[in-house]
């Protein structure tokens, strides 16, 4: 499992280590380079000094004005310096006594080497040497005034080669403690870095750990917990906000689920109680044949009622899944209304209801006809069932820029504002006693789900005293305004008006 | 014994009331809280079975109004709500017992019988009146270890008199507690019932256990034998 703490620690320590090594190496190289540069300058001066002693004899041969006493550092002794000078012909012109007859380097090596280099001195000490090409000066003072009687001296353009090697122990003596200091410093830095980095990482990740700890404690029974937002770092604020929103939704979902379960249990308990009571009484007193026949009828009715309830629950459950918007077709809102009212003509007349459909122009929508019809049909059924006796049901269809609005209102004096919040919940019924066996209280929940599936927003309100209104907002995406008014709809409506008290008005 | 059943479910009301009648209770029924409250206030019941979720007035409100009106009839609440809070609310509202749907009819019957016994301050299911032993749990009557077969109504009459043993019980009280509103009460229905009961429980050689107090009613005497 990926651990942020391990990852931060690893990368922080790695970064500190790399930076430390690079810094130490750079510093070491800088100091070493400076020391060598200084040492090489000295070498070069010493080589130049020796080179200046090189001269050309009158016969053109190279000679050296050197005496050991003038430069005692080249004498054989403790920790001497070394030099060796080659003539143009490659012959050794002079070499330090400290070499004790041996050669410092060969001529070929001297000619091949360009700059200063490190070597091991003949006495075993670490040394550094340089090759210097020295152009000798003509011997004497007459080089400014050549003697016409004497043949002019031939000055060789081939330089003599001065090789000088010195002990570089002083450089090492400076660099070695520096290197040791770097190693010791590096180890201290590494140890310190581990402690400091771990502390910083722990301190930096503490809000994350606290958040994780808090999240770990959230369970189905503590969904009312909310993460503190004000005290968390800015980087975690958005996470906390999102988590709180998620918890809010989960809490609501769990509450809804619990309420639904309780409602289902309650809905099932009454028919089960009826069934159990019927069967137990019938079994205990089986003699009464007429009573038994009634009980069988009752048991059958209970079975049908429970079957209907289960079917409604299954339909609701299935509708809560995401349905693909397949089989869409153009549907006339007014036509659906007309058909829905037509199936309830008998009840409308029996309850002496007045029905009117008002539309500036019909609204055609591209949608799943079956779902839209169920939405409208359920709402019309409710309006017809629950409208006050001899009341009025009005349907308004209104086209606007954003789409189409269908509102269905009816006279009703039993609903209150607080009912509007709960009426779309499963099993909600205004009659808390649930005596009405014809309605399970799932209709509006199904309407909401179906409307949601086809992108329709549904709201309810009490626009005035004793008046209830449900509004469907159909977005433009599925609403296709029919600019050409179909007069046949008006004729059909008028005909229905005559047959049943439905009034359809097109403004 | 007379019981009021207030239940809005038609099927449950019919079956439970039928079962209670078969068990010997006189049962009146009401389909909503309003009717139930009216009956509870105006009639004398030995126990009331009251559903909580009722149309018009819910069961808890009925119970509170009953208690406020001074009615102390024992009430068994019947409901589909089974949480502890629901039970506590019901019992604190003045209920004497609480039964959750779905229930076993036997349990309902036993609880109603227990409430009736409590109504008459008699916690023992066995009542002994002279040579008679009445088992209110088994609803049986024995005289000297011999079982006496009684009809449900005869048993109810005997049980009611036994609950009030040593006290004079008027005909009106007997009518109120033994007969429900469905019964066709003739003027001598109580006398006839007492007469029929005497024939079954009395020893022909000994004075009747049920004495008539002219103009007042009947009394079941413990020391008659």
Image (cartoon, coloured by chain):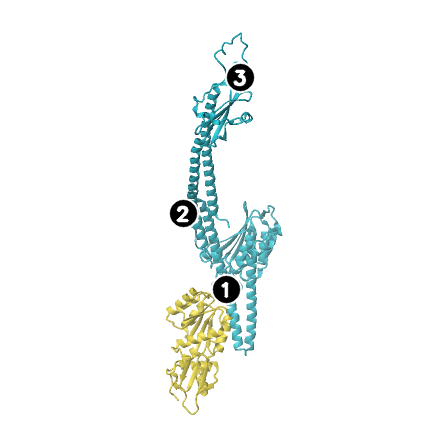
Closer to the chain start, of discs 3 and 2, is 3
Callouts 1 and 3 close, C-beta under 8 Å = no
- The tag on residue B81 is none
Q: Quadrant of residue A74?
A: top left
Residue A175 placed where, x, y %? 44, 34
Which chain is in yellow here?
A: B
Position of the C terminus of chain B by quadrant: bottom left
Residue occupied by mark 2: A231
The subunit carrying tag 1 is A
Q: Secondary structure at mark 2?
A: loop
Q: Residues within 10 Å of mark 2 (few under 14, many from 20)?
A: few
Callouts 2 and 1 close, C-beta under 8 Å = no
For the residue pair B172 and A12, the one nearer the viewer reads as A12
Residue occupied by mark 3: A61
Callouts 3 and 2 close, C-beta under 8 Å = no
Position of the N terminus of chain B by quadrant: bottom left
The Cα atoms of the two marked residues, 3 and 2, are separated by 92 Å
Height in image: A107 above or below A291?
A: above
Which chain is in cyan here?
A: A
Closer to the chain start, of discs 2 and 1, is 2
Residue occupied by mark 1: A265
Of marks 3 and 2, the one in the foreground: 3
The subunit carrying tag 2 is A
Pick out the residue farthest to the front.
A101
Q: Residues within 10 Å of mark 3 (few under 14, many from 20)?
A: some
Is A464 placed left or right of A355 in the picture? Answer: left
For the residue pair B195 and A14, the one nearer the viewer reads as A14
């Amino acid at each position: 499992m990926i651990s942020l703490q391990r990852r931060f620690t690893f990368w922080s320590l790695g970064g500190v280590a790399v930076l430390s090594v690079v810094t130490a190496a750079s510093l070491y190289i800088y100091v070493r380079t400076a020391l060598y540069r200084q040492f090489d300058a000295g070498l070069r001066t010493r080589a130049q000094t020796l080179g200046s002693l090189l001269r050309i004899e009158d016969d053109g041969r190279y000679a050296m004005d050197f005496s050991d006493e003038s430069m005692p550092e080249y004498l054989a002794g403790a920790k001497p310096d070394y030099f060796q000078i080659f003539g143009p012909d490659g012959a050794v012109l002079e070499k330090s006594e400290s070499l004790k007859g041996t050669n410092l380097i060969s001529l070929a090596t001297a000619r091949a080497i360009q700059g200063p280099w490190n070597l091991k001195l003949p006495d075993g000490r670490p040394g550094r040497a340089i090759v210097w090409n020295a152009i000798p000066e003509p011997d004497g003072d007459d080089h400014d005034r050549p003697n016409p009687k004497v043949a002019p001296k031939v000055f060789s353009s081939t330089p003599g080669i001065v090789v000088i090697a010195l002990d570089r122990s002083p450089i090492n003596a400076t660099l070695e403690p520096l290197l040791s200091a770097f190693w010791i410093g590096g180890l201290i830095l590494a140890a310190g870095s581990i402690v400091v980095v771990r502390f910083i990482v722990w301190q930096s990740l503490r809000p994350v750990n606290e958040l994780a700890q808090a999240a770990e404690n959230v369970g189905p029974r503590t969904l009312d917990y909310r993460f503190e937002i004000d005290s968390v770092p800015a980087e975690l604020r958005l996470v906390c906000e999102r988590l709180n929103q998620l918890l809010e939704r989960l809490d609501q979902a769990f509450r809804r689920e619990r309420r639904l379960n309780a409602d289902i249990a309650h809905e099932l308990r009454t028919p089960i109680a009826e069934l159990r009571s019927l069967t137990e009484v019938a079994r205990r007193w089986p003699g009464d044949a007429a009573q038994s026949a009634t009980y069988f009828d009752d048991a059958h009715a209970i079975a049908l009622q429970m079957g209907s309830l289960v079917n409604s629950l299954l339909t609701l459950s299935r509708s809560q899944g995401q349905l693909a918007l397949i089989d869409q077709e153009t549907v006339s809102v007014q036509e659906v209304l007309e058909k829905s009212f037509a199936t309830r003509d008998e009840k409308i007349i029996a309850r002496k209801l007045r029905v009117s459909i008002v539309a500036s122009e019909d609204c055609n929508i591209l949608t799943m006809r079956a779902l839209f019809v169920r939405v409208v049909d359920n709402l019309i059924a409710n309006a017809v069932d629950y409208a006050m006796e001899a009341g009025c049901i009005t349907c308004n269809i209104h086209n606007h820029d954003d789409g189409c609005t269908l509102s269905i209102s009816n006279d009703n004096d039993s609903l209150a504002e607080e009912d509007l919040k709960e009426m779309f919940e499963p099993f909600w019924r205004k009659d808390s006693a649930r005596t009405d066996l014809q309605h399970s209280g799932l209709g509006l929940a199904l309407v909401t789900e179906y409307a949601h599936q086809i992108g329709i927003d549904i709201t309810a309100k009490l626009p005035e005293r004793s008046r209830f209104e449900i509004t469907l907002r159909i977005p433009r995406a599925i609403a296709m305004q029919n600019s050409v008014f179909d007069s046949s709809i008006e004729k059909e409506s008028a005909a229905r008006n005559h047959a049943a008290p439905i009034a359809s008005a097109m403004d | 014994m007379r019981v009021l059943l207030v239940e809005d479910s038609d099927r449950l009301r019919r079956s439970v009331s039928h079962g209670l009648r078969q068990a010997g209770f006189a049962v009146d029924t009401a389909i909503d809280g309003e009717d139930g409250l009216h009956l509870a206030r105006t009639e004398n019941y030995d126990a009331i079975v009251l559903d909580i979720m009722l149309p018009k007035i819910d069961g808890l409100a009925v119970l509170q109004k009953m208690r406020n009106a001074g009615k102390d009839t024992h009430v068994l609440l019947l409901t589909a709500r089974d949480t502890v809070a629901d039970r506590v609310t019901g019992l604190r509202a003045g209920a004497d017992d609480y039964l959750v749907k779905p229930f076993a009819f036997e349990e309902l019957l036993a609880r109603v019988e227990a409430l009736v016994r409590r109504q008459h301050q008699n916690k023992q299911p066995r009542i002994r009146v002279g040579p008679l032993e009445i088992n209110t749990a088994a609803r049986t009557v024995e005289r000297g270890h011999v079982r006496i077969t009684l009809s449900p109504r005869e048993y109810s009459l005997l049980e009611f008199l036994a609950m009030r043993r040593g006290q004079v019980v008027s005909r009106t009280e007997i009518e109120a507690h033994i007969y429900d509103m469905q019964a066709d009460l003739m003027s001598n229905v109580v006398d006839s019932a007492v007469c029929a009961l005497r024939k079954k429980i009395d020893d022909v050689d000994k004075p009747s256990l049920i004495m008539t107090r002219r103009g007042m009613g009947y009394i079941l005497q413990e020391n008659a034998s």
